[in-house]
Amino acid sequence: MTHLHGSTHLRLGVNIDHVATIRNARGGLHPDPVRAALAAADAGADGITAHLREDRRHISDEDIAKLKGTIALPLNLEMAPTEEMLEIALRSRPNASCLVPEKRQELTTEGGLDIVRHASLLEPYIAKLRAAGIRVSLFIDPDRQQIEASRNVGADIVELHTGVYCEARHGKSDAEIDFELKRLQEAAEQADEIGLEVHAGHGLDFESAGEVAAIPQLVELNIGHFLIGEAIFGGLDSSIRRMRAIMDNARAKSSGSKSA
């Protein structure tokens, strides 16, 4: 029996990390990630995501404090499962914390957490975050074992890694693209069935977001780098509104086809 946490409205979480990347390339205060978060809210975002990395390559501790104190939208803090990040999360009290794998040498998050392998490490972090009233999300690959393990360690949410699907759309065969999309669909259905809220993100753009948005169990998409990059050409407001429209249209079509 499916719980169908999903609804006609699919939430859009806008990741503002790479506004800070541009700021940090030169130093100083411009462009301001908090200003970007406020603009995202005006353009139709439902939440703001920020990844506080251990090396502080983009978002800073001060950014997190300012975001929490300024924006009205829910704040999703992406973080590695470390004592330092736990302390910051407990101090800043975001709406949610998404635990992600992190390697210093990577340019971006390259894959999902291995919950099966690291369950004993993750459980105390999850318990402490939840005890503080912070919802816990785990960024995982669309894999049946990882989903089951996520439920077992006490997560509220899984965020399915869409990067492999998005990469497949650039040069792979139709069969490979369909295979990766089916993995996401089946993972979303499984996670929803066992009581997890289902999010998705990584690498989504105007072309790839529609098929993912049509997955009925999904509650939220988190998109960042593409939207910030696209803002160079048409503005942040325009890029977010266009993504919001693509998501809404995909969800409406999906809902309509199921009720027909």
Image (spheres, helix red, strand yellow):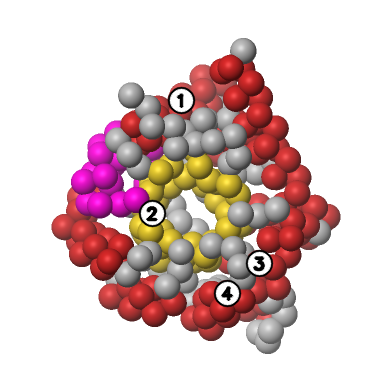
Total numbered labels: 4
Q: Of tags 2 and 1, which is closer to the observer?
A: 2
Magenta segment boundaries in residue numbering: 140-156
Residue position marked by numbered label 1 in the rendering? 182
Residue at 26% in and 45% down? 151
Upstream in sequence: badge 1 or badge 4:
4
Q: Earlier in the sequence, mark 2 or mark 3?
A: 3
Quickly name the residue at label 2: 137
Quadrant position of the C terminus in the picture: top right
Q: Are marks 3 and 4 in contact (CB under 8 Å)?
A: yes
Give yes or no for contact between labels 2 and 3 (Cβ–Cβ under 8 Å).
Answer: no
Which circle's residue, 4 or 2, is located before the other in the chain?
A: 4
Circle 4 is placed at which residue position? Answer: 67
Residue at the extreme right of the image, as rendered:
234
Q: Is residue 163 visible?
A: no
Number of the label disc, if any, that sits on residue 37: 3
When asked about the image quadrant of residue 122, the answer is bottom left
- Secondary structure category for the residue under label 1: helix
Q: Amino acid at mark 4?
A: Leu
